[in-house]
Amino acid sequence: MSQVKLDILKHEQIQYIEFVSKDINRAKNFYAASFGWRFTDYGEHYTAFEGDFVDGGFTSGTPINGTILIVLYSKDIEATKSKVINAGGVIVKDIFSFPGGKRFQFTDLDGYELAVWTE
């Protein structure tokens, strides 16, 4: 983890997220195309990812939908939505307003539902 990330870590905030994926290479391609995440493989059944403000990993297995909704921030929600669609994501709730901003929700290629928000 870079020193910059260490300097912005907040007490009791999400620091690392692990997903289960049926196809780790497919997940890597999707998240690299959608959000620019970078990956480091640790064997054939695990890869770690690094984004600008989140780190995590993917492990081999069968995903279970409906457990946690992860929400990502975007400065340009329309552009992010287009990247998600172009990478193969499916929009399950189109952009809508909520107190504090706008967001949309999508499923990735393993069926996980995530959201993206903006002010």
Image (cartoon, rainbow, N blue to C red):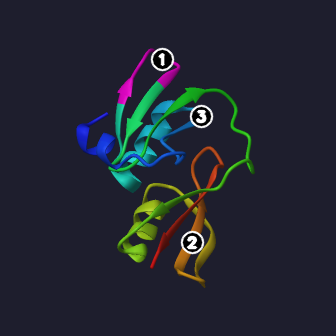
Q: Alpha carbon of mark 2 to alpha carbon of mark 3: how far?
A: 22 Å
Please give the label number shown on residue 44: 1
Question: Residue 29 occupies which quadrant of the picture?
Answer: top left
Amino acid bearing label 2: Phe
Q: How far from the left and from the top, in percent, is residue 69?
A: 65, 55
Question: Residue 39 occupies which quadrant of the picture?
Answer: top left
Please give the label number shown on residue 21: 3
**Tag 2–tag 1 contact (CB < 8 Å):** no
Residue 8 falls left or right of residue 56: left
Q: Is residue 110 above or below residue 106?
A: above
Amino acid bearing label 3: Ser
**Tag 2–tag 3 contact (CB < 8 Å):** no
Q: Which residues are magenta?
A: 40-46
Q: Residues within 10 Å of mark 2 (few under 14, many from 20)?
A: many
Please give the label number shown on residue 104: 2
Between 68 and 88, which is closer to the camera in this rendering?
68
> Disc 1 on helix, strand or loop?
loop
Q: Is residue 89 above or below residue 110?
A: below
Q: Alpha carbon of mark 3 to alpha carbon of mark 1: how far?
A: 12 Å
Q: Alpha carbon of mark 2 to alpha carbon of mark 1: how far?
A: 32 Å
